[in-house]
Image (cartoon, grey):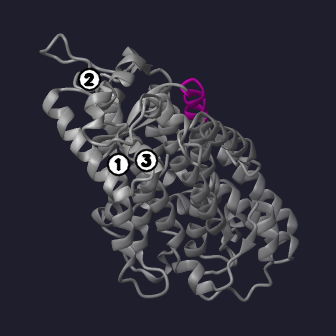
Amino acid sequence: MKLWGGRFSKNTDKITDDFNSSIHFDKRMYRQDIMGSAAHVKMLGKCGIIPEEEASLIRDTLFQILEDIENGRVDFDVSAEDIHMNIESILIQRIGDVGKKLHTGRSRNDQVALDLRMYLKDEVIKIKVMLKELLEVLINLAENNLDTIIPGYTHLQRAQPVTLAHHLMAYFQMFRRDVERLDDCYDRIDVMPLGSGALASTTYPINRQMVADELGFSKITENSIDAISDRDFVIELASCLSIIMMHLSRFSEEIILWCSHEFSFIELDDAYSTGSSIMPQKKNPDIAELVRGKTGRVYGSLFTLLTVMKGLPLAYNKDMQEDKEAIFNAVDTVKLSLPIFTRMLETVKIKKENLLFAAKGGFTNATDLADYLVKKGIPFRDSHKIVGKMVAYCIEKNKGLDDLSMEELHQFSDKIDMDIYDAISLQTCISDRKAPGGPSKESVTIQINNGKEFIKSLQFDNMLF
C-alpha cells in the first residue's frame, strides 16, 4: 500500500504506476531530497513538533541511506513513484513508526519544489565553472593573437580588417553575459519554499528561516500558493541555457566554415575531429556540428516548459512533473557541450598567413579610403561614391586598392597624395581604430585586461557539489 493509500480500496494498476512514476529521472535528486529532509526534521525537533531524539534518529538514518545510495546498495521502487516517496519508504522500513514522522508539516508539493531548487543551484554553479574555463581559453587565445590580422565580416562578406584577438573577445563578451545571466537566475532559484505545504502552509509552529539557513538559501518564499506553483525559475534557467547554446552554436558555425578548404583559416586538432567511412581524405568538424545540432535540443526543453506551464491553474498540477526531464536534459546537454567545445577551441591551429591573405582581399580597406578622402575635405557621401567607383575599377582590372598607381588614383580624385598607401594599409586600418571597443591593439588589450578582472571576480563560494 502506498504512503498516501488510506483513501483507496484497491491498488493502482501496474501501467498506472509506470505512467505516474518519475523515479527513473528524478532519482538524480536523491542527495538534495535527503539533505532537505534532514534540515526539515532537525527543525521539527528544535521547534518541539517531534521529540529531538526522534529527529536525531531520523537524521542519522537519512545520512545512512545517503551513504548506501552512493555506494550502490539501494534499489529504487517504481511503485513508490518518485525519489521523495522512495527515500521516505526506505526510512520507514529501517526505523518503523518514527520514520513516519518525517513528513510532519510538509507536503510533497513543497518538498519537490525544494529539491528542484537545490539541485538547480548546484548545476548553475557547475555550469559557471565550465564557462569560466571557456573564458580563460578565449583570453589566452586573444593574447596570443593581438597582431593576427583577419577579415571581419558582415553578411558573410569581407567587410573590414580586424584582429583575431578582437574577434575572439566578441565571443568573450557573449559568454560573459551568459555568466551574468546565470548569476541573476541563481538569485531567483535561491529561495526556500519548504513550509508552504500543499498550497496553504501548515498549522504546525515551524521555523522556515531555520531550514533556509541550514540549507544555504538566502531567503524564503513569501506566498505559499506561488511557492508551490512557481516554475519560473526553471523556465528562466532553460532560457539562460538556450542562450549559452546559441552562442556555442554561432561559434561552432564559424569554426565549421573556418576549417573548410574554402576558408582554410584554422585546422582542428585530430583529437577533436573525425574521419569518413568511405572518403580517406576527410577530416570532419563533428564536435562543432554536434554542438550546433544539440542547441535545438535545449531550445526544445525551453519550449516544453513554456508549453507545460501556459495553461495551468493554481496551485500544483501533475503536469508539472514534466518540468524535470526537460530541465535535466537541458542542463545535461550544456554540461556535455561546454567542456568539449572548450578543449576543441584550445587546441585549434591558426593559419595566420591564410588569414592575412584573406584580409587583403575583398577591399576590406575601402572604408578607410573613404575616410581618408573625408579628411581631405570631401563630404562622406561623395567620398563613398568615389571609392565605390574605385572598387568597380579594381574588380575590372583585377587589382586591390593599394595596387593602384598614383596616376590611376588621380583619375578618381586629385585630393589623393602619396600618404594614401600608408593610410589604407591593413595595419593602419586596424591601429587607427583606437575608439573604446575597437580593434586596435591598445583597445583590445584593455578588453583583455577587463576580461581578466571579470574572471578574477567570479565567486563560487556557494558551491554545493
Tally of numbered tags: 3
CA–CA distance in space, label 2 to label 3: 42 Å
Q: Which residues are magenta?
A: 136-146
Q: Specify the amino acid type for callout 2.
A: Asn
Expressed as whole percent of the image width and height from the top left, the position of residue 263 reads 27, 26
Instruction: Left or right? Give the position of 79 relative to 445.
Output: left
Determine which residue is flagged by label 1: 295
Residue 140 within the segment the image draws in magenta: yes
Q: Nearer the N terminus, badge 3 or badge 1? A: 1
Expressed as whole percent of the image width and height from the top left, the position of residue 198 reads 57, 82
Instruction: Left or right? Give the position of 24 relative to 100.
Output: left
Instruction: Left or right? Give the position of 10 relative to 54.
Output: left
CA–CA distance in space, label 1 to label 2: 19 Å
Label 3: few (<14), some (14–19) or many (≥20) C-alpha neighbours in 10 Å:
many
Please tell me whether mark 1 sits on a helix, a strand or a loop: helix
Whether pointer 1 and pointer 2 mark residues with C-beta atoms closer than 8 Å, the reply is no
> Can residue 58 be seen by looking at this rendering?
yes
Determine which residue is flagged by label 2: 284
